[in-house]
Amino acid sequence: MTNAALYAERLKRADEAAALIRSGAKVAMGLGVSQPPAVLKAIADRAERGEVEDVNLHYLLSCRIAADTVLRYELMDRIRPWSLFHSAIERKLEQRAFEEGRPNPVRFIPTGFQQSPRLLCNEVGMDALVCTVSPMDEDGFFSFGTNTDYAKPVSQTARTVIVEVNPNMPRVFGDCTIHVSKVAAVVEHAAPLVEVPKAEPHPNDLIIGGIIAGLIEDGATLQMGIGALPNAVCDALRGHKHLGVHTEMLTPGLVELMQAGVADHSRKTLHPGVGVFTFAMGDRNTYDFLDGNRGMEAHPVSYVNDPSVIARNAKMVSVNATLQVDLTGACCSEFLNGRQFTAAGGQLDFVRGAHASDGGKSIIACHSTAAKGAASRIVARLDGPVTTPRNDTHIIATEHGWVNLKGLSSDERARALIGLAAPQFRDELTRSAVEQGLI
């Protein structure tokens, strides 16, 4: 049978595809941009009519597509969210349940991003995958486009794969395709992709961006996290040369560096001449840049975020943000106000991989204060779980400077970190350090 015939055989309406999801199924939903609006609406409609129940939805980083369909509060007794990385959507669901005195409807699974394919494929085991893909090519392959991450590995083990073909999804190269013969249903639906434009930088972002840019050499390979601060670092790197990209998330800031010729991947020691990522989230320019671009490759997160793979990039530099740093150097980057805020993501993967690289640097940055200056982000003790252990932390930066913690004793670390805190909190932190026996 030809690829065109296979495609025609599997082509279904969204409601027909959704009917393949049975009660009790474990379903992996694409991350972020790849969440398929037509299919998810059809699943939500079935749940609302009482045609399906106990659907266990596993995913990272939901967006408004999911919020408007399968993650509606009134469906939580029929569709069960299993979040591996919270967004504002899960936080809102949890808050509403708390206010109503009801059990938390969201089940959170702690895991590192690199481990998510193994968790979904082996430890939990997915019955189905639903995601958005680019149109089929002449050889019968769909590209996972913006989201190879765990979608590619799960597509190889799930019994039912439902793809929503969107002509706006970029065709991306790398280890990021699925053949039409491997899918159970194809749903055609044209819709704008979710866009996340660059956040406006705070003045302190610009200061920290300049500090970090000064630590990055020409020819370095970059990983940047999400948010205004990593984008400010990218803006501060415009005068650099021959940078490379090996990142879990491809952001507008990194794309702009490539478009400006600052990042040309020419000195990469792994995948030379090619930028590597596992998922993308940005503006239309980001997606247009990816479409048909042979200079970019997407690979599963189990590869991109493997510390031993990351370390093969000479002069690897990872830049990530955190919420709190304690006086020993441990970081909490996922917990806020007593609740799960996001998740560990790939921070520790890149902290370890970058530091193991020849000439590499792992940089964790934050503003020195939060709550409009009322709280210090440099703290005596963390308020939540440890995302990056003190043994792994390399360089910490705030608007007050930076410090390399490697090789420092406990008292040297405490003193150095107090020096990165806002001046109004330093005396209190010093007292806490004395009470803990750190200094």
Image (cartoon, rainbow, N blue to C red):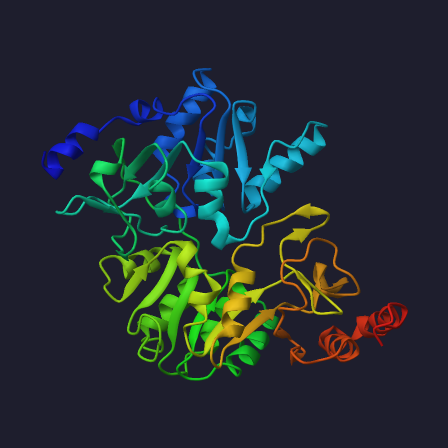
Horizontal arrangement in the rendering, residue 298 relative to residue 142 (left or right)? right
Instruction: Give the quarter of the image for residue 167.
Output: top left
* Residue 47 in view: yes
Q: In this view of the protein, which residue sits in the foreground, 350 or 87?
A: 350
Identify whether 53 is placed above or below 268: above
Horizontal arrangement in the rendering, residue 225 relative to residue 415 (left or right)? left
Residue 360 image point, x, y percent: 50, 77
Q: Quadrant of the N terminus?
A: top left
Identify whether 200 is placed above or below 59: below
The residue most toward the front is: 122
Point 54% across, 79% down: residue? 210
Horizontal arrangement in the rendering, residue 50 relative to residue 208 (left or right)? left
The residue most toward the left is: 2
Point 21% across, 37% down: residue? 181
* Residue 62 in view: no
Q: Quadrant of the C terminus?
A: bottom right
Residue 255 image point, x, y percent: 36, 66
* Total numbered circles: 0
The residue most toward the top is: 50
Residue 69 image point, x, y percent: 45, 31
Identify whether 57 is placed above or below 148: above
Instruction: Give the quarter of the image for residue 108.
Output: top right
Q: In this view of the protein, which residue sits in the foreground, 63 or 155?
A: 155
Identify whether 328 is placed above or below 338: below
Point 50% across, 60% down: residue? 226
Residue 383 image point, x, y percent: 75, 55
